Amino acid sequence: DSGVTQTPKHLITATGQRVTLRCSPRSGDLSVYWYQQSLDQGLQFLIQYYNGEERAKGNILERFSAQQFPDLHSELNLSSLELGDSALYFCASSAGPGQGPGELFFGEGSRLTVL
Amino acid sequence: AQSVTQLDSQVPVFEEAPVELRCNYSSSVSVYLFWYVQYPNQGLQLLLKYLSGSTLVKGINGFEAEFNKSQTSFHLRKPSVHISDTAEYFCAVSRLNTGFQKLVFGTGTRLLVSP
């Protein structure tokens, strides 16, 4: 158990809809990362937050947005969903500066299926 | 920008045989290197990492990797695999001294261990 909790584990929805994925980082971790894993694209970095502030952006679509709340949990919002958005969405956490580089702790993912 | 190439999408091997999973990276700056493992229906977990110092790095579950700067490689090895090593293995890089651990992942290598 990594200590990172993601909900829901599975989600099935229709094209055009909007969903919210939730992540609770490990206790004490200030950084949250979102990754998308799909068969054709592999693991793609979407966005990173540190203590409530956006720190890095990757291949995140404009239809997607995220935020990190004062209690450090994070939400990834996906809107106007398309078939191609079907993927496994991972959240990972780390303490941020001062922690060993690359030590991300991953949740078990939220599997999104868009029909 | 950094990139990672994992040449083998799938590696079948018999139990107790040795295995090598290949990883090459590209970067104009110095990087940290990592191997993560993803067991079925689970999130990723850190297997081992190279930050500096000895180029031979030992990780969990008997795995080791060797950093070769001249060949820009970081191949993962295990002298004798078990059925339980069946999983997806991801090589990843991050830039040095960024303070934040944004990882760029390879496309993964599926290790299939059979009796």
Image: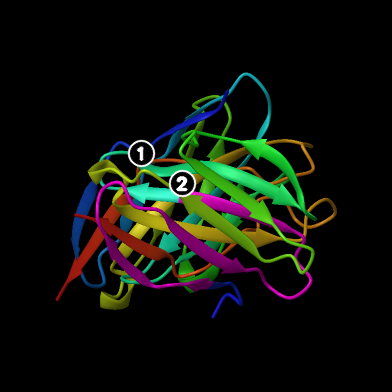
Direction from residue B11 to residue A29 in the image, left or right: right
Residue A24 lies, with reference to residue A38, above or below; the image says below
Q: Which residue is mark 2?
A: B91
Q: CA distance from mark 2 to mark 1?
A: 7 Å
For residue B106: magenta?
no
Residue situated in front as seen by the camera: A85 or A104 = A85
Residue situated in front as seen by the camera: B85 or B53 = B85
Q: Quadrant of the C terminus of chain A?
A: bottom left
Question: Please, what is the three-letter code of the amino acid marked with disc 1?
Answer: Gln
Chain to which mark 2 belongs: B
Residue B98 x/y as whole percent: 77, 37
Chain to which mark 1 belongs: B
Residue at screen point 58% across, 29% down: B69
Question: Please, what is the three-letter code of the amino acid marked with disc 2?
Answer: Cys
Q: Alpha-carbon neighbours of circle 2 within 10 Å: few (<14), some, or many (≥20)? A: many
For residue A11: magenta?
yes
Determine whether label 2 and label 1 are within 8 Å by CB: yes
Q: Earlier in the sequence, mark 2 or mark 1?
A: 1
Residue B76 x/y as whole percent: 43, 51
Residue at screen point 68% across, 29% down: B30
Point out the stretch of residues depicted in magenta. Answer: A6-35
Direction from residue A9 to residue A69 in the image, left or right: right
Q: Alpha-carbon neighbours of circle 1 within 10 Å: few (<14), some, or many (≥20)? A: many
Residue B38 lies, with reference to residue B7, above or below; the image says below
Direction from residue B103 to residue A31 in the image, left or right: right
Q: Residue furthest right?
A: A98
Task: Answer with the quarter of the image where residue A40 lies.
Answer: top left
Residue situated in front as seen by the camera: A64 or B105 = A64
Mark 1, secondary structure of its residue: loop
Q: Which residue is mark 1?
A: B6
